[in-house]
Image: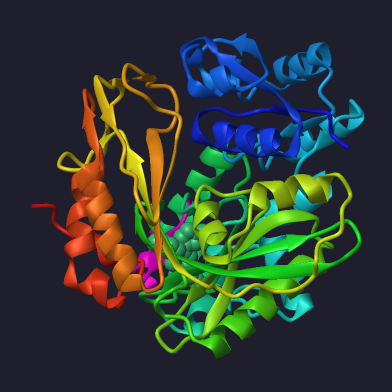
């Protein structure tokens, strides 16, 4: 039904979407900033439109420029990718106003998950477990102290407009409350222009496990199993895998059902992810819902042998989903290869890639927009690509990952490859016994 899709993004995800469109016989329009003239997504699309200057606000985040590009190329749909405008309800609404299908959920669905307190209220009504905490916004410091005393310390203060860790404070005892309350509120106001904060019981040493879901325009919802994203550093994921080494068939069923309830509660359409915190006793709590395709979607694609971008486009065209749930049939791991110096606090390392050789062979998938001679611009995130390996067992997927990482040759910029090589040899990582705190005391040698 779509003849032409404009991809409002750059880098590997733009290329990822172009690849699936080509397989589906859909024409593609790439957009690019002047810093991305030589990017592969520009070369591989059927058409390409320069939309402005390097700064995101002057290109990939500029709705007027994107709509102009869609108009002049006669695109009938826009794929937002991840990041940039992917979870911008206003952008989804404007696409609708222009008669261009936004390949994703409706503006209302995006908004309902963007505000964390109202998302939590929706989940409580739907019967999805949430972390115990305040009913709504905190009204005063005294209220915060009273509720914390009742619940017991430690507690966590979060911004209702937050997500991804901004405006969050752990409070271990009452003496710390005043400072935490004040600074969290100020940070929320500065970061989100919304100073609403709320409080929850602090879940100690949790795992981050998320459930991939898909819903069509007719109310059918299915889950596509989990990804374990506990290997993070300052809220940046570095490694994701499926199945989670912590998962049991019973927990998968329970979390899968909870994720479907969460999606059904807002009549969710498109692919999306429900994030949970999971404690050491396998209690799980709704954290957030991501109303977009994610970086780590490839892990799920490999374990269930399924093209999630194709599914997302088909849903946007009004097709029905099968409605059945999916269990992992393989083990897959993804390492994010970033142009960052892991020996120097993961400092970004943009610049020209002088030598570039990627791994291959059995059980290896590489998603990347880079090539020898490509210049990584300093304006955007530093991901060079994603290395995904898959095998029958986790142990074999790790062995393949180590082998594949060893085959990489990237010169000209620093990369996270040395970090991943050490992680794949780490006993605790290999045992599967880790949580979101794991990288706090991981030392690169
Ligand atoms: C929490 C938590 C512990 N208890 N909430 C981090 C990002 C934001 N989406 C929510 N986050 C957390 N919320 C309660 N009640 C711990 C985190 C958290 C975290 C969660 C997932 C992955 C990595 C993390 C790193 C630090 C803190």
Q: Is 144 placed left or right of 340 in the picture?
A: right
Vertically, is 372 above or below 87? above
How far across and how far down the image is residue 440, in percent?
24, 61
Q: Which residues are magenta?
A: 167-179
Q: Quick check: can you spot residue 178?
A: no
Is 170 part of what is drawn in magenta? yes
Residue at 54% across / 10% down in the picture? 53
How far across and how far down the image is residue 85, in percent?
65, 34
How far across and how far down the image is residue 407, in percent?
22, 43
Residue at 56% across / 18% down in the picture? 42
Vertically, is 122 above or below 8? below
- Direction left: furthest residue: 445
Vertically, is 55 above or below 339? above
Which image quadrant shows ligand 1?
Answer: bottom left
Q: Nearer the viewer, residue 193 or 210?
A: 210
Q: Is 3 placed left or right of 141 in the picture?
A: right
Residue 119 image-quadrant placement:
bottom right
User: Which quadrant of the rendered structure holds the N terminus?
Assistant: top right
Q: Is 287 placed left or right of 152 in the picture?
A: right
């Amino acid at each position: 039904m779509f003849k032409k899709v404009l991809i409002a993004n750059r880098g590997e995800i733009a290329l990822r979407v172009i690849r699936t469109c080509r397989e589906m016989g859909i024409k593609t329009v790439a957009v690019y900033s002047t810093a991305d003239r030589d990017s592969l997504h520009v070369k591989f699309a059927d058409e390409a439109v320069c939309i402005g200057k390097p700064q995101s606000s002057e290109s990939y985040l500029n709705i007027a420029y994107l709509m102009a590009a869609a108009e002049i190329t006669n695109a009938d749909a826009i794929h937002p990718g991840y990041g940039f405008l992917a979870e911008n309800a206003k952008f989804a609404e404007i696409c609708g106003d222009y008669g261009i299908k936004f390949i994703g959920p409706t503006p209302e669905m995006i908004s309902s998950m963007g505000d964390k307190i109202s998302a939590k209220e929706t989940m409580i009504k739907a019967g999805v477990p949430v972390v115990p905490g305040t009913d709504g916004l905190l009204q005063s410091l005294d209220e915060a102290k009273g509720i914390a005393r009742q619940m017991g310390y430690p507690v966590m203060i979060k911004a209702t407009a937050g997500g991804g860790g901004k405006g969050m404070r752990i409070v271990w005892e009452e003496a710390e409350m005043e400072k935490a309350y004040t600074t969290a509120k100020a940070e929320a106001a500065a970061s989100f222009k919304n100073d609403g904060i709320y409080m929850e019981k602090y879940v100690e040493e949790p795992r981050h496990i998320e459930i991939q879901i898909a819903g069509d325009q007719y109310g059918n919802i299915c889950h596509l199993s989990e990804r374990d994203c506990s290997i993070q550093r300052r809220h940046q994921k570095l490694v994701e895998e499926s199945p989670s080494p912590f998962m049991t068939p019973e927990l998968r069923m329970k979390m899968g059902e909870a994720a479907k309830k969460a999606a059904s509660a807002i009549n969710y359409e498109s692919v999306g992810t429900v994030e949970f915190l999971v404690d050491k006793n396998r209690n799980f709590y709704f954290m957030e819902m991501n109303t977009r395709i994610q970086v780590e979607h490839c892990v799920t694609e490999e374990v269930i042998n399924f093209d999630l971008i194709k599914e997302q486009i088909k849903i946007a065209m009004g097709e029905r989903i099968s409605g059945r749930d999916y269990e992992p049939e393989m083990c897959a791991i993804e390492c994010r290869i970033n142009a960052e110096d892991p020996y120097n606090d993961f400092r970004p390392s943009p610049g020209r890639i002088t030598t570039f050789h990627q791994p291959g062979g059995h059980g290896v998938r590489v998603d990347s927009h880079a090539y020898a001679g490509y210049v990584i611009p300093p304006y955007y995130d530093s991901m060079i690509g994603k290395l995904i390996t898959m095998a029958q067992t986790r142990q074999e997927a790790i062995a393949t990952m180590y082998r594949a990482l060893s085959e990489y040759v990237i010169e000209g910029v620093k990369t996270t490859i040395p970090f991943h090589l050490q992680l794949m040899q780490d006993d605790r990582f290999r045992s599967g016994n880790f949580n979101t705190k794991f990288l706090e005391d991981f030392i690169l040698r």
